[in-house]
Image (tube, rainbow, N blue to C red):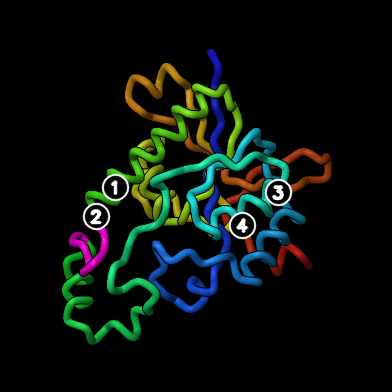
Amino acid sequence: MIDYKLYLIRHGLTQGNLDGQYIGVTDLPLCREGERQLRKLKKLFVYPDVQAAYVPPFRRYQGTASILYPGAAQRPAEGLGEYDFGIFEGRRAEELKDFPAFRRWMADAMRTAPEGGEAPQDFTARCEAGFLAVVEDMMRSRITSAALILSGGVMMNLLATHAYPRQEPIYWKSEPGTGYTALITPQVWHRGQVLEAFNPVPYRKNDQNDSEPFVRFDLEEEEE
């Protein structure tokens, strides 16, 4: 029986991230700081080898894959882009705090769609379908090792739904350029769409040129 490893990795920073904006369907590229962080991560740590990188059709995901996996073929990951924030798209919480529509949205714990935006249940269904399509494509194409570039929120929700051990979404929070390893065993996956999530990626280099996983890090401290 063939097992499959899928490395779920959060995309690098955009200027919208740095500015605290709600960025979902806006197609921002990585900012200079985002590119710098990813290159530093790749220099200091080890990303596992992959046969392909699955990327949603936005520049921030494609740019992340190009830096971390320049030699890997990029395959489409349709449906796995970020949430559509509607009228809140591209704006900061600080500038929206006095808008009644924004206050109602926050008071409802974002369980309703913002005006012009995406219904949460539609977002969940879209991401589920997109993730299942990626796993099916890996198995059909015999791609046993791949990266999947995602937003932090999409990654947290997918792992909370499918990963064992079971954890709340916040448990799977990750920094830009980092993520988790998902081990997919076809027999287990087809029975209940369950995968095993374990070692964070990338890996810390050790003196024996081997690697060990890490969870949290400070790039400035690591560089010193």
Q: Which residues are magenta?
A: 111-120
Per the model, the C-alpha gap separating discs 1 and 3 is 33 Å
Residue on which disc 2 sits: 120
- Determine whether 24 is above or below 166 in the image: below
Which of these two is toward me, 53 or 175? 53
Q: What label sits on residue 204 in the rendered view?
A: 3
Choose top left, top right, bottom left or bottom right for residue 167.
top left
Whether label 1 touches label 4, CB < 8 Å: no
The residue at 22%/71% (across/down) is 106
Q: Quadrant of the C terminus?
A: bottom right
> Of the residues shown, which amino acid type is indicated by label 1?
Thr
Q: Is residue 222 left or right of residue 169?
A: right
Q: Is residue 44 left or right of residue 186?
A: right
Q: Nearer the viewer, mark 3 or mark 2?
A: 2
Residue on which disc 4 sits: 63
- Determine whether 12 is above or below 104 in the image: above
Q: Would you say residue 114 sits in the magenta stretch? A: yes
Q: Is residue 3 left or right of residue 204?
A: left
Residue on which disc 1 sits: 124
Which of these two is toward me, 69 or 221? 69
Where residue 139 appears, x then y in whole percent?
50, 23
Q: Nearer the viewer, mark 1 or mark 4?
A: 4
